[in-house]
Image (cartoon, rainbow, N blue to C red):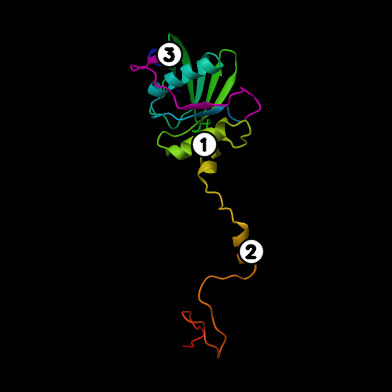
Amino acid sequence: MKLTTTADRRPVISLTPPSTPRLRMESTGSRRTLLDGAWWPRSTDPVAELPGLILAIDKLRGPVTRLVLAAAGWDSHPRRLGVNGRVLRLGYFTSQPVSLLTAICGTNERIDLLVVPPRTATGTADAAMVLAAATTNKVHAQHILLAVSTPTPRPVDAAEEEWETEGGQIGPVLAPAGHRAPAGQSAGRGEA
């Protein structure tokens, strides 16, 4: 059992101004979605990254009062964070997926965001954020990066499909035994 000390109850305050978060949120505020959007932090330092995110959510959905984060994936685990003159409670849980952050607003509204790892390639991060913010998204946070980074099969055009199904071939033309192959082509079957 861990005892809570006075130092644990003191809020941590970032010494730098909040950065503009890389955030994409579902625009309607619908509760029929798996996720409300996505956030792509620049680092794994919660004191540097969370204030900008909190202020952005404040403007879009109302004041954030609490954040639920994964225990893994962060450099530190402050329990209280001072942002814009108020103190927010932060909870870190091993049961929370690393790719999910939950914000609780003053109206008891719950906002679930995909957390894109900081070193993710730009194209993959953008695709993941678009999918997470889509009202039609059916992919859970922990599977989104895999879903957007899995290559989709190349579409086959009609001419190629016909070629494949009617016996077209790529390679040398083989002449039947006793016949000569057309000029410039292999005779096959050991013939010259």
Q: Position of residue 188 (x, y in %)?
A: 50, 83
Mark in front: 1 vs 2: 2
Question: Measured from the top left, where is residue 137 in percent x and y?
Answer: 61, 35
Badge number at residue 83: 3
| Above or below, 60 relative to 151 | above
Mark 2 to mark 3 CA distance (whole Å): 63 Å
In the image, 30: left or right of 152?
right
Q: Is residue 20 magenta?
A: yes
Residue 182 is situated, as x and y percent measured from the top left of the image, at 51, 82
Badge 2 local density, few (<14 within 10 Å), some, or many (20+)?
A: few
- Crowd tier of the residue under label 3, counting other residues whose Cα lies within 10 Å: few below 14, some 14–19, many 20 or above: some
The magenta-colored residue range is: 11-33
Residue kind at label 1, given as amino acid type = Ala
First of labels 1, 3 by sequence position: 3
Q: Residues within 10 Å of mark 1 (few under 14, many from 20)?
A: many
Q: Would residue 19 be counted in the magenta stretch?
A: yes
Cα separation, mark 1 vs mark 2, equals 36 Å
Q: Which residue is mark 2?
A: 162
